[in-house]
Image (cartoon, grey):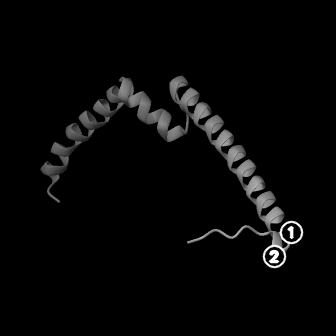
């Protein structure tokens, strides 16, 4: 590589890093840094907690429906063949 080309790259690289440091102080720069570190803002944490609560509620409702279905299946399987209701097609 030409010696003068390398001398021209030094200020360009310097400006790039200065711009990168300046960008890190902007709102978007902080958001990207928080995302990389795994931190969430307050609104996102509240939304995530609400979604987790809704997920737990749906899980409980599904388990309850499953228990009811099991109960209905056990009840129907205990009936004698003569007691079973035959529905016309």
- In what element is the residue under mark 1? helix
Q: Is residue 61 above or below residue 27?
A: below
Q: Are marks 2 and 1 in contact (CB under 8 Å)?
A: no
- In what element is the residue under mark 2? helix
Q: Residue at x 38, y 30 (%)?
A: 29
Residue at the far bottom in the pictured view = 81
Q: Is residue 12 above or below residue 63?
A: above
Q: Is residue 3 left or right of residue 58?
A: left
Q: Is residue 14 above or below residue 6?
A: above
Quadrant (top left/top right/bottom left/bottom right) for the C terminus: bottom right
Res 73 → quadrant:
bottom right
Task: Give the CA distance from mark 2 to mark 1.
Answer: 9 Å
Disc 2 residue crowd, few under 14, some 14–19, many 20+, Cα 10 Å? few
Q: Is residue 37 left or right of residue 86?
A: left
Q: Horizontal and vertical percent for residue 69?
A: 73, 58
Quadrant (top left/top right/bottom left/bottom right) for the N terminus: bottom left
Q: Residue at x 82, y 64 (%)?
A: 74
Front: mark 2 or 1: 2
Residue 81: mark = 2
Q: Horizontal and vertical percent for residue 52?
A: 63, 38
Q: Residue at x 35, y 23 (%)?
A: 26
Q: Horizontal and vertical percent for residue 61?
A: 69, 44
Residue 78: mark = 1
Q: Is residue 85 left or right of residue 47?
A: right
Which residue is more in the foreground, 65 or 24? 65
Q: Residue at x 78, y 54 (%)?
A: 67
Q: Is residue 37 left or right of residue 53?
A: left
């Amino acid at each position: 590589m030409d010696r003068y080309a390398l001398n021209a790259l030094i200020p360009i690289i310097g400006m790039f890093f200065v711009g990168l440091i300046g960008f890190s102080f902007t709102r978007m720069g902080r958001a990207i840094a928080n995302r990389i570190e795994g931190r969430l803002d307050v609104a996102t944490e509240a939304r995530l907690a609400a979604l987790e609560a809704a997920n737990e509620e749906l899980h409980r409702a599904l388990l309850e429906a499953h228990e009811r279905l099991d109960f209905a299946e056990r009840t129907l399987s205990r009936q004698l063949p003569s007691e079973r209701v035959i529905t016309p097609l």
